[in-house]
Structure formats: structure tokens, C-alpha cells
Image (spheres, rainbow, N blue to C red):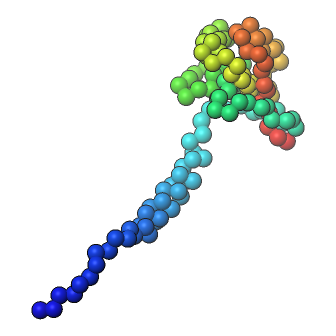
Amino acid sequence: MARSKRKPMSDINVVPYIDVMLVLLIIFMVTAPMLTQGIKVDLPKLESDPVKTEKNQEPIIISIDSNGAYYLEMSSSADKPLELNDLIKKVQAILEQKPGTSVLLRGDKHVEYGAVVALMSSLQEAGANGVGLITEDP
């Protein structure tokens, strides 16, 4: 009986790993657009420069829908409308923990101007240095 002297193979076959990664990439590319959530707001269309925010600091985004309901867009409360007083208390608590956080406002183009001004005034009293308005490009 002749024994063949083969060395054990010490290379890793990476082809199956590449196949798995490509399948996962396709799955994420298909499902990522479906994960967007939020409140339907018809933003006004105009040209403007982007608001500069600090890196690694997520801004506070507040939405006002066409009915004048306020929403604080966070993972836990983006789907429930809030009263103005409750909204201001939550924003004030966030600003106390993270001073200097940017506050951005998404106002539906059909909402009354007075509701936007009242919110901006209340946010200023809550400690927001400035409020950015979110729009869409035309």
C-alpha cells in the first residue's frame, strides 16, 4: 500500500463568504427604503443652503402636520401627536442633557403660520439657540 504524502491544506476558501455577503447586501438594499418612518408632511419647496450640525450629534426634529398637530421625531414617539406643552417639556429635557443640540422644524406647507411661530417662540423659551426649517429642493 502506497501512502501519498499530502500536506494539509491551510488556506481558507472565501468564495462562500463572498456569496453570503452579496446576498446580505442585496437584502439590505431592498429592505432599507422600506424602513423609513415618520409623519407625512408636505414640505414647501425652495432652494436653501443646508443647515450645519455637529458630527455625532443628532438634531431634534419636530414636525407639524397639515392639521397643526406636533410630533417629536424620535424612535419612541414619532407616531403620537403631542400637545405643545408636552412637546416643549420633552425638548427642554433633551436640551438640558445635551446643550447645543440643533432643533429642526418640519412644517407642512398647509399649516397655519401662527402655529409655526408659536412653536418657534416656545422652543426659544425652552432653551433652543436657534431653529432650522426643513424644506425640500424644488
Write the residue at 85% across / 35% down: 49
Q: Nearer the viewer, residue 12 or 27?
A: 12
**Corner quadrant of residue 122:** top right
Task: Decide if residue 83 is in sight here.
Answer: no
Asked whether, in this view, residue 16 is left or right of residue 7, the answer is: right
| Residue at figure coordinates x 60%, y 15% from the top left | 97
Instruction: Where is residue 108? Give x, y as percent.
Output: 76, 27
Quadrant in the rendering for residue 102: top right
Q: Quadrant of the C terminus?
A: top right
Q: Is residue 15 left or right of residue 7?
A: right
Q: Residue furthest bottom?
A: 1
Residue 81 horizontal/vertical position (percent):
61, 19
Q: Above or below — where is 128 with respect to 133?
A: above
Farthest residue in the right direction? 47
Residue 11 visible? The answer is yes
Which residue is pictured at 70% across the width and 9% down the height? Answer: 126
Q: Quadrant of the N terminus?
A: bottom left
Q: Is residue 72 above or below residue 134?
A: above
Occupied quadrant, residue 35: top right
Above or below, comparing residue 19 to residue 37 in the picture: below
Residue drawn at point x = 88 percent, y = 38 percent: 47
Location of residue 121 in the rendering, given as x and y in whole percent from the top left corner:
78, 10
Counting labels gives 0
Residue 16 horizontal/vertical position (percent): 41, 67
